[in-house]
Amino acid sequence: GENVEQHPSTLSVQEGDSAVIKCTYSDSASNYFPWYKQELGKRPQLIIDIRSNVGEKKDQRIAVTLNKTAKHFSLHITETQPEDSAVYFCAAKNNDYKLSFGAGTTVTVRA
Amino acid sequence: EAGVAQSPRYKIIEKRQSVAFWCNPISGHATLYWYQQILGQGPKLLIQFQNNGVVDDSQLPKDRFSAERLKGVDSTLKIQPAKLEDSAVYLCASSLRLAGGGSEQFFGPGTRLTVL
């Protein structure tokens, strides 16, 4: 089955700086890669996703890049704000339609 | 549009007791998922339905866990009997379809289960 690894497990950044989270996946057939943000005690919410036919996608301060050859994808948050503090999960979906999640990255934005 | 609804939000039981969780997906969503999220980890898929049929239950501990979606809308997840290691948040999610556009999953608020 699919195995998704996520790094780092914790990330502390100064407000205004950028944050980068990296994930690797094992199944070359995976074709959909969403990122979820989960605030303490709340549900995971989709913030951005990318499909395997696209190399990069951007939405305001958030961008995701995908390298199919290396089987890794990354989340970039620019100009971080205190409200960006949360746990971020990457995930990968393969042809079995199963979504496999990474272990999560706890992001803390210092004011 | 209304989101995914789950109940109860919290449940505390003793080991060997039984518990059931309920999920109502977003209207029109054919696919429904149950995840287990242990503290500090990512969600782990337990079972996946397409309408009222099971697509994948390979990670469901079938000796104690069961789930159904009889009319292809609401779903229930049951644990009988519960063990200490079942303490987790149980998340329900739904999507319009399995793959392609519209396969994005929307999560419910979860049920936090504590087994004593």
Image (tube, rainbow, N blue to C red):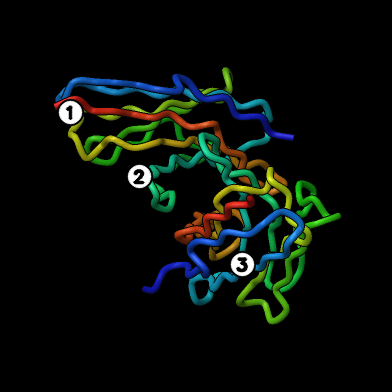
Give B64 or A17, whichever is nearer the viewer.
Answer: B64
Mark 3 and mark 2 residues within 8 Å of each other at the beta carbon: no
The disc numbered 1 marks a residue on which chain? A
The mark total stands at: 3
Q: Which label is found at residue A79?
A: 1
**N-term-proximal mark, 2 vs 1:** 2
Q: Nearer the viewer, mark 1 or mark 3?
A: 3
State the residue at coordinates (66%, 70%).
B76
For label 3, the residue is: B21
Q: Nearer the viewer, mark 2 or mark 1?
A: 2
Q: Amino acid at mark 2?
A: Glu
For label 2, the residue is: A39
Q: In this rendering, would A104 be left or right of B88?
A: left
The disc numbered 3 marks a residue on which chain? B
For label 2, the SS is: loop
The x, y position of residue A110, in whole percent, is 19, 25
Give B46 or A20, whichever is nearer the viewer.
Answer: B46
State the residue at coordinates (60%, 54%).
B99
The x, y position of residue B50, in whole percent, is 69, 66
Q: Amino acid at mark 3?
A: Phe
Q: Which label is found at residue B86?
A: none
The x, y position of residue A101, in whole percent, is 57, 38
Q: Quadrant of residue B57?
A: bottom right
